[in-house]
Image (tube, rainbow, N blue to C red):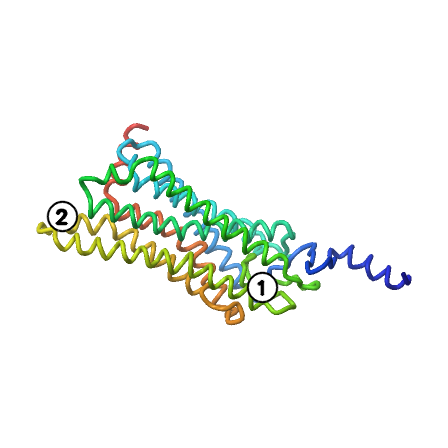
Amino acid sequence: MEHGTFNNILIMYREGLWEEGNQSYQGEFILLGVADRPRLEMFLFAIILTCYMMTLLGNTTIIVVSRLDPHLHTPMYFFLSNLSFLDLCFTTSLGPQMLVCFWEKKKSISYGGCVAELHISLALGSTECVLLAVMAYDRYAAVCHPLRYTTIMSHSLCFRMAAIAWLFGFSNSLVHTVMTVQLPRYGENRIDHFFCEVPALIKLACVDTSFNEALLVASSAVFLIVPLGLIMVSYSYIVVAVLRIRSAESRQKAFNTCASHLIVVSLFYGTAIFSYVQPASNYSRDQGKLVSLFYTFVVTMLNPLIYTLRNKEVHKALRRLMKIT
């Protein structure tokens, strides 16, 4: 081997760029975000920090109240606690690293950290897609079959449905994580995003990514369109059942039990479909970033507010716990 060639390989190794087969090892990634606009960066830092703190407070409150108050030991609050725990993990998997990148001049993340961020955030997002469909079925059973509700939504069924949601979410993420990290980048490590996300990482590849994009759109259809379709079917039965109720007060009560879930579904699926059900090549630079911030921090912050502000049972549970303490 010539001396010059050996030196080139040594330099590449020291810089953390080593090509092996079809894989590209990266010592670190650079998260560009909005580094070219420092004022916007500081504004986003304040907004995201506020949203993150409110997300922690709101979702933790729902989990604690649902756990401590016996009146809330029902399937609805079991799934709501799962959703709150999921949102806590989701924002925590991205928020701290993003805030550090906003604050520091060096917008870097290690290769392992980027892969972990990609896998965990996608897994939790996929899990939420399935979990929201499960929650819609729970509302269907409560409104359409009130007398058999406790029999239909047994403890074992609730645990199985929640477990399936988590299993499907992490399985989907594992496939995309493996497929994405295997794409050759040949030293390209500048991610034009706030965090490590599949569409943004696909754009770094120096080969044809048509298969990866098709796989992403297909899995997005499975995890977004199919659950959304099931949710719509569930609510079509709910609407029919509610219209058959003669009492206006009873109709309003039945509607209120579903309204919070419908608002959360609209916010989550609307932004997620915009982000993922399109080829990565059409992924708009600014639109993709703003939408990802919205569903990562704003939606997860609003979820506990939506459920608590409209929910009299949670209000009563909070008052009971405050009297005890």
- Give the residue type that dot 1 points to: Ile
Residue situated in front as seen by the camera: 261 or 309: 261
> Where 315 sits versus 179, above or below?
above
Residue behind mark 2:
250
Residue wearing tag 1? 202
- x, y percent for residue 185: 67, 63
* Mark 2 closeness class: few <14, some 14–19, many ≥20 residues within 10 Å: few
Residue 124, percent from left and from top: 47, 49
Three-letter residue code for mark 2: Ser
Q: Nearer the viewer, mark 2 or mark 1?
A: 1
Mark sitting earlier along the chain (2/1):
1
* Residue located 49% across and 65% down the image: 288
Count numbered badges in the picture: 2
Query: Callout 1: 10 Å neighbours few (<14), some, many (20+)?
Result: many
Is residue 186 shown left or right of residue 166?
right
Please tell me which residue is depicted at 70% across the width and 56% down the height of the picture.
25
* Quadrant (top left, top right, bottom left, bottom right) of the N terminus: bottom right
Taking 188 as reference, is 281 left or right? left
Q: Quadrant of the C terminus?
A: top left
Circles 2 and 1: CB atoms closer than 8 Å: no
Residue 5: horizontal and vertical position, in percent? 86, 63
Q: At 35% across and 58% down in the image, what residue appears?
A: 228
Between the C-alphas of marks 2 and 1, the distance is: 51 Å
* Label drawn at residue 212: none
Which of these two is toward me, 192 or 143? 143
